[in-house]
Image: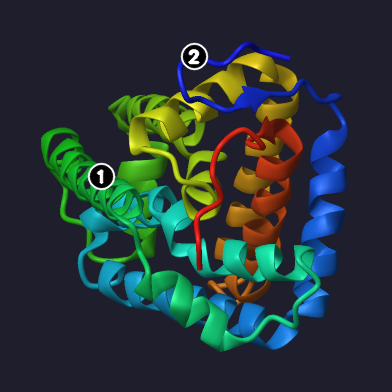
Amino acid sequence: MDAPAGDDARVRTVPLARPFAWLALGWRDFRRAFGPSLAHGAVAMLAGLAILAVGLHAWPLLPGAFSGFVLIAPVLATGLYELSKRLEHGERPRLAHVAAAWARGTRPLVWMGLGLALAATLWVLVSALMVALFVHAPITGLADFLRHVVVGEGSNLFPLWAALGGLGAAVVFAATVVSVPMLLDREVDLIAAVRTSVRAVGENPLAMALWAAIIMLLTLASMATLMVGFAFTIPLLGHATWHVYRDVVDASTLPVRRS
């Protein structure tokens, strides 16, 4: 167990295969709070469809828009963390609990959301700039997009974009993997929550790498179903993330955030 700094929570070390247990617990919570959870998933699906619709008319924005959407997902899942928290306390979760969680949005949570939104916006702009710099042929459809952006005939655009995006995603993952549910659950400032999240990743590099890979695979699978899969994967991953936090972080020394 890692020693905390100041008012940070303690971090536990978990086995490599623990992410599969988190998925199982997430699925259990999804089934127990099916209605409110599916509502979250439906909103995520509609957001994905909206991004796709915009992308079909502005192809250079498509890669950044989808990856930016993934960046802000940890904050968008706040309601799902609240549902799992209510289930943990033996309550029957309702949409009213979700609304209450958003209504009492604390300053650290607001700053986290603004920071992720800014990061997502900057990434969309960087992605569009990279396409403009590396692709000189017109992109009018999917075939042109795949040929000039993904395959990158005559350029290294896609490997460079993937490398930069992967680096940014790794930083965001480390900073948010447990910090957002922690901010919902405990009276803690943003810096301490982010610091705890980074330490959680550092103490569990293999388990967290597996968890990140699972998130990536489920996200890609959802996109492959024309966003329909998000209706189920977003609630599953949101609920599971609550259990990642509860499993990896010992926040018992910190005051509970009141509803």
Q: Residue at x 68, y 88 (%)?
A: 35
Above-or-below relation of 182 to 139: above
Above-or-below relation of 213 to 137: above
Viewer-closest of 239 and 131: 239
Viewer-closest of 161 and 95: 95
Look at the numbered disc 2 and give the secondary structure of its residue. Answer: loop
Look at the numbered disc 1 and give the secondary structure of its residue. Answer: helix
Question: Whole-percent x and y of residue 146?
Answer: 40, 51
Residue 129 placement, left or right of 142: left
Q: Which residue is mark 1?
A: 115
Residue 243 placement, left or right of 141: right
- Which residue type carries mark 2? Ala
Count neighbours of disc 1 (C-alpha within 10 A) and say few if under 14, some if 14 to 19, many if 20 or more.
Answer: few
Q: Residue at x 49, y 14 (%)?
A: 5
Location of residue 150 (image quadrant): top left
Q: Residue at x 56, y 86 (%)?
A: 95
- Which residue type carries mark 1? Gly
- Tell me if I can see residue 245 in this picture: yes
Q: On residue 5, which mark appears?
A: 2
Above-or-below relation of 185 to 208: below
Question: Whole-percent x and y of residue 87?
Answer: 76, 70
Total number of numbered discs in the rendering: 2
Q: Earlier in the sequence, mark 2 or mark 1?
A: 2
Q: Nearer the viewer, mark 2 or mark 1?
A: 2
Above-or-below relation of 91 to 239: below
Residue 223 placement, left or right of 124: right
Of the 4 image quadrants, the one containing the N terminus is top right
Q: Residue at x 29, y 28 (%)?
A: 154
